[in-house]
Image (tube, rainbow, N blue to C red):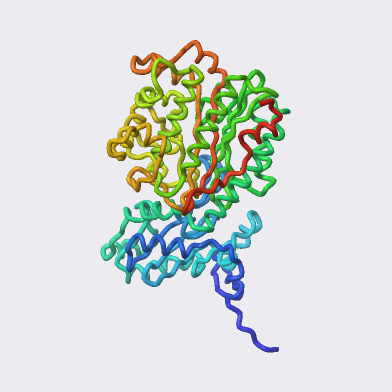
Amino acid sequence: MEATNIEHSLVIEGEFDALSIEVKAPTSLHGQNAKRYPAKLHARKVAKALGAQEGLIYLPGQWDVNWEDSDQGPPFRQRRYFYYLSGVNFPGCSVTYDTEADKLTLWIPYTPPATVLWFGHTPSPEDCLAGSDVHDVKYNNSLSDYLASRLAKVKTLYVLRSSQMPKFAAFDSLKPRLYIDTTSLQPVMDEARAIKCDYEIDMIRKANDVSSEAHREVARLMYGMANECQIEAAFLNSCTAQNAHSQAYPIIAGSGANASTLHYGANNEPLAGRQLVVLDAGAEWDCYASDVTRTLPIGSAFSSEAKAIYHLVHQMQDECIQRIRPGVVFRDLQLHATLVAVKGLLRLGILHNGTADEIFKNGTGAAFFPHGLGHHVGLDVHDVLSKELLHPVGESMWGKRRPIGPSSLRAMIKQSAARGSGHDVTANADNATASGDKQHGTLQANMVVTIEPGVYFCRSYIEAYFLRSDQHKNYFNQAILERYWAVGGVRIEDCILVTENGYENLTTAPKGEELLRIVGVEH
């Protein structure tokens, strides 16, 4: 019988005092998967931005952790910076990138037979190479030797932060000869992550497809639902049935007054007697997020108040999406959405005693639209550099988590006026034209951002900060406002890809007239 050369590796398994032979698949098999994760592309992009002719990037992945006083723990969630350079989503791994040699190596744990009995196999080196285009995959038990050897030759070690430095016996003796850079890597990786490659766009599109179908399924079932928890359950069921087992963020299913709480999460109240429900929910696909919001009528008819706000928010979103293209300053889109809201609320009589321009410049629109218009989407739902989309302003914002109050709104208006070289602020907000004003969050091709305007009637917030304020209270017609408290709020959100010449809406969940037809509401 003719001898055959078999590529293999030897692994010492200490628990059983055994030598395990791992047979490697032929190299030719690794290139057959055209959809491998583009780890090398990402690593080279980061190294180029670092300007690193030589050095070693080291990123540890996440380990399984248990809750305190328990042998159970939260669902595993991979470190996103590690994932960006590896494409690997299981615990106990690390990745190194030798910038001079242009070699990206993934380090993975070996799974002993006793562990396989309980938890099954972790991916093998062959599995990892089939899914990610790293240069090599090795077991963790040789990582210390590799680091000791390589760090004795390079001058710089790049780590994300000091808490993620490598841990091995010889490291302390190597530190004096190394420059350990703990500050350069994260901002460079943030810049890289903000501009998506084609693979990442495909993953975000897939996540949006799953979420859009789940939103469609909720709309189909809406008429028979009696509680917010049923809406949450229907969304989760649809995502899981599509093999998407992780949500990008906790589901928000807020009805009535709960719709005016931006990050409501109880999802346990009855729908009876309420007009609208805001469903903000998005699945992950291979660690990439989606973020989708729809507002659905409860029952078979709209109240005139709910219908008016529903269509106003659609107008806010439609006009902002139409303005998306490279070079547009995101802050100007925020101002445009606010101006549309102010004009609409004036038409409805909720605001009065002033012109749209006067009320807009006073910052009073923040009473009803108190959050950022959107954020980046990627490996995190509020992805890296999201706060830069509206920075600098009075507060440090991240997605919807920090309110945009009147002072922040006035600061944005002032910045927009300064950029416009004395042009009318309202005209700037209306046009939202390209300006190249990158320091204030300029859109670039292959960014993915959300456009998620809303109008909310949060009684506690409006009464405390506007109706008791001499600067704002005269603009409110409280008799008419009283009719709108029960509406709660309306938010509509899509994920938008910035293209070379405009945009592509990655979210296909029904909205507007299509959504109302599915729900069966008279409109």
Q: Position of residue 381 (x, y in %)?
A: 50, 44
Tell whether 313 sits left or right of 46. right
Q: Nearer the viewer, residue 450 or 7?
A: 450
Give the image quarter of residue 127: bottom right
Q: Residue at x 29, y 67 (%)?
A: 155
| Residue sitting nearer the eye, 458 or 345 | 345
Q: Residue furthest left?
A: 176
Residue at 65% of width from left, 41% of height from top?
A: 214
Q: Residue at x 33, y 29 (%)?
A: 410
Whether residue 42 can be seen here: yes
* Extreme residue toward the top, this view: 479
The quadrant of the rendering that contains the C terminus is top right
- The single residue placed furthest to the right in the displayed view is 224
Nearest the viewer among 287 and 439 is 439
Residue 504 on image: x %, y %: 54, 48
Q: Is residue 71 visible?
A: no
Occupied quadrant, residue 314: top right
Indicate the position of residue 301 as horizontal and vertical percent values.
68, 22
